[in-house]
Amino acid sequence: MNVAAAGMAPGGGVPVISVKNVTVRFGGIVALDGVEFDIHDGEILGLIGPNGAGKTTLFNCLSRLYTPNEGDVQLHGKTILDQPAHRIAGMGIGRTFQNVASFSNLSVRDNIRVGAHSASKSDPVSDALRLPWVRKGGEAIDANVNELIGWLELEDVADLPVAGLPFGTQKRVELARALATDPKLLLLDEPAGGLNHDEVHELGSLIRKVRDERGVTVLLVEHHMALVMSVSDRVVVMNFGRKIAEGTPEEVQKNPEVVAAYLGGGDA
Ligand SMILES: Nc1ncnc2c1ncn2[C@@H]1O[C@H](COP(=O)(O)OP(=O)(O)OP(=O)(O)O)[C@@H](O)[C@H]1O
């Protein structure tokens, strides 16, 4: 059987995410034009491209903020386009935001709890009545939050408000919040933005650790070329709404169309 034709990963199995012929138009602007690629289980996939290439638009399709005009986005072979954005955490997709989106007056611990709640099945009425299944769920969430605090080395700041913490720490809280839903797929939206050289290096190690130790598949949308090339297993390159290359970091860096796109756009 031709596994590529059957839409399967080289090692077998349905891809975690399949982006199928996705087109998004904003009035006359074609932001995405028939984009196709898969992300396989346990992979770190980097998505790059010059300014205006369509990266954010694609990210927004995967996180269900946008619905494509054409095409499909499938999670484990099932469309996600019939689900609203607030359901994606429950479906196993976690995401971070380009600008840190934590609740700055809440403690680190409470921010992570909010993340964990976004994938829980509780509702405000059951919560208010403290129904037994909610209490049990709450205990499980506490254990999960504590485990993440330890895993991300946030113990010293766990009960401090997020406001006032160093930016790199705030980004780790953001990551903890996304991981608190126990995602199968993590969407990272320009996580290196605003970080210094050492912090970017730490972030790279952390992204690999998320995949290696937690088994999370990662999509990394990022301008920081050194980070993308050092952590990604494969890289998809976009320009003017189209995929222009896909391959290992070595392959895409040698691709003449990629080189031309960056020399022409010149932002990376
Ligand atoms: N809400 C919108 N309304 C109209 N046009 C839009 C909208 N969002 C994006 N676009 C256009 O779609 C194209 C793709 O934009 P997008 O933001 O997805 O690119 P990007 O690769 O994320 O760019 P950057 O690296 O600068 O963030 C651009 O031409 C952009 O101007």
Image: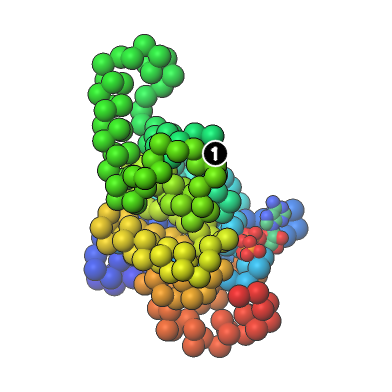
Residue 74 against residue 159 in the figure, above or below: below
Q: Quadrant of the N terminus?
A: bottom left
Residue depicted at x 27% and y 43%:
147
Q: What quarter of the picture does the C terminus occupy?
A: bottom right
Q: Nearer the viewer, residue 2 or 161?
A: 161
Q: Identify residue type, mark 1.
A: Ser
Q: Is residue 56 left or right of residue 143?
A: right
Q: Residues within 10 Å of mark 1 (few under 14, many from 20)?
A: some
Which quadrant of the view contains residue 124?
A: top left
Q: How many marks?
A: 1
Seen from the viewer's position, the closer of residues 138 and 151 is 151
Ligand 1: image quarter = bottom right
Residue 191 in the image: x percent, y percent? 50, 59
- Which structural element holds mark 1? loop
Query: Is 188 drawn above or below residue 102 in the view shown?
Result: below
Residue in the picture at 53% in, 66% down? 196
Residue 93 placed where, x, y %? 40, 47
The answer to whether mark 1 is within 8 Å of ligand 1 is no
> Residue beneath label 1, please?
104
Q: Residue at x 39, y 40 (%)?
A: 158
- Residue 32 in view (yes/no): no
